[in-house]
Every structure is written in C-alpha cells, then in structure tokens.
Amino acid sequence: MTAFLLIWSPKKWPWPELPDIAKRVAAGEAVTDVWGCGVARSILPGDRVFVHRVAQEPKGLFASGYVTRAPYEVPDAGSKRGYRLCIDFVYDWLVDAHHDVVIPRDALRTHPFSVQTWDAQSSGTSIKPMVEGALEKRWKELTGTRARPVLAAIPTATATATQKTAQSTKTSAHAAAKRRVWSTALTSPTLPVSAGKKDKR
C-alpha cells in the first residue's frame, strides 16, 4: 500500500462544511470525499491518503483515509487541460483543522519526517516509504487503532453530476465539477463543495 499527500489551503477554499463532516466521522460514519490529485495517475483504490493544512496556522496533518476510486477526469473549463484529476476516498480520521491538527507542521521537521516535501504545490505527492511507516506509527499513537471504514453502495460521481445538472441552470461541465460529501447513512447528497478547490495553495 502506498500513501499520498493531499493539500488543503484555507486561503483558496474556506471549507465551511468541515466542522460538520468531522463530527460525522467522529460519530463513526463512513464519510467519503472527492479531492483533486494534481497530475498523479498512479493512485490506486486501497492506497492511503493524509491531508495537510498549509498557508495558515494551524498547519499540519489533520485527516487520513483510504482511496476508493482511482484518478478520473472531471471537466474544468478553468484548467489548461480542460479537466481536473480527482480521486474518491473514505475518511478514517478527521478533525476540524480550523482549530487544531493531529501532527503540527513543526513536528514534521524532525527526522525521518523531514525528508518528505510537506508543503507541496498541489495534492497527489507520494509519501516516501521511509516516512510512511513512521507516519502510520505516529498517527496510530495519536488517534488510536481503527478498522478500515466499510462502505455500502453509494451514488457514483456520474450520477451526482447528472442530478446536479437536472437541478441547476449552470452548465453541465460546471455541475460535473461540483463536489459532494456522502455518508453511508444517507441516501441523498449533502454538503456541496467545488471539487478540487481545496488542493490549491
């Protein structure tokens, strides 16, 4: 299993839904999310992801999860490529990083964490093998040991985009780029956020 780094900059995306999502994860819900992954196409289902808050304090790692869908293209008229690469993943740990993080940025400056580039320009950076093991160990020490979240059937990204298009006067490309957070306990989409916004610095 390989681990990858996802980036969130509150300067680029304030993420007002984060407190509610964190509460749902803490309550044991298997909450899935969509995230831009830069140019990374090697991410596979089952791979590990860690989310790092950058640009503003508190900086540091505040979430982890498992990839549930490999990179796929989402139309994005604002991109030179005309699309944005995104992944789907399920959280196994998440705190409200508006107020606190699990591993502060300063703690990542010590060996062996210091060999990793944490302040990446975009999401999708592979976490070095020598860092991954130490990171997982420290993460478990701070958050505890949990079973991997089990997902029931949830609506696909294509279905989400179709529903959004039917309910909106916006273009289908814009609708396809909209992000929604889902929970296995729910049967309807909730918490809309623009896909990939959070990975920009």
Image (cartoon, rainbow, N blue to C red):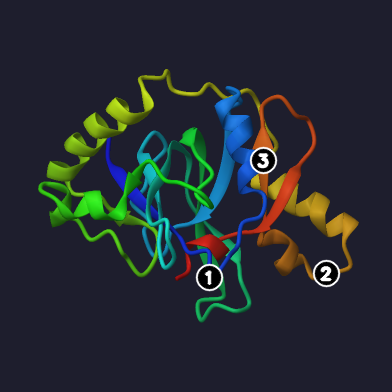
Residue 12 point in image, percent of width and height: 54, 70
Marks 2/3 in contact by CB < 8 Å: the verdict is no
Q: Which residue is mark 2?
A: 170
Q: Which residue is mark 3?
A: 20
Q: Which residue is mark 1?
A: 11
The residue depicted at 52 percent of the width and 35 percent of the height is: 90
Q: Secondary structure at mark 2?
A: loop
Which circle's residue, 2 or 3, is located before the other in the chain?
A: 3
Which sits in the foreground, 96 or 32? 96
Which sits in the foreground, 46 or 22? 22
The residue depicted at 50 percent of the width and 24 percent of the height is: 149
Inspect the image, locate mark 3, and give the three-letter code of the amino acid beneath it: Asp
Q: Which image quadrant is residue 159 in? A: top right
Marks 1/2 in contact by CB < 8 Å: the verdict is no
Residue 67 point in image, percent of width and height: 44, 39
Inspect the image, locate mark 1, and give the three-letter code of the amino acid beneath it: Lys
Which sits in the foreground, 52 or 81? 52
Q: Which image quadrant is residue 169 in? A: bottom right
Relative vertical location of residue 12 with respect to residue 80 in this rendering, above or below: above
Residue 47 is left or right of residue 185, and the answer is left
Residue 151 is left or right of residue 57, and the answer is right
Q: CA distance from mark 1 to mark 3?
A: 20 Å
Residue 5 point in image, percent of width and height: 34, 52
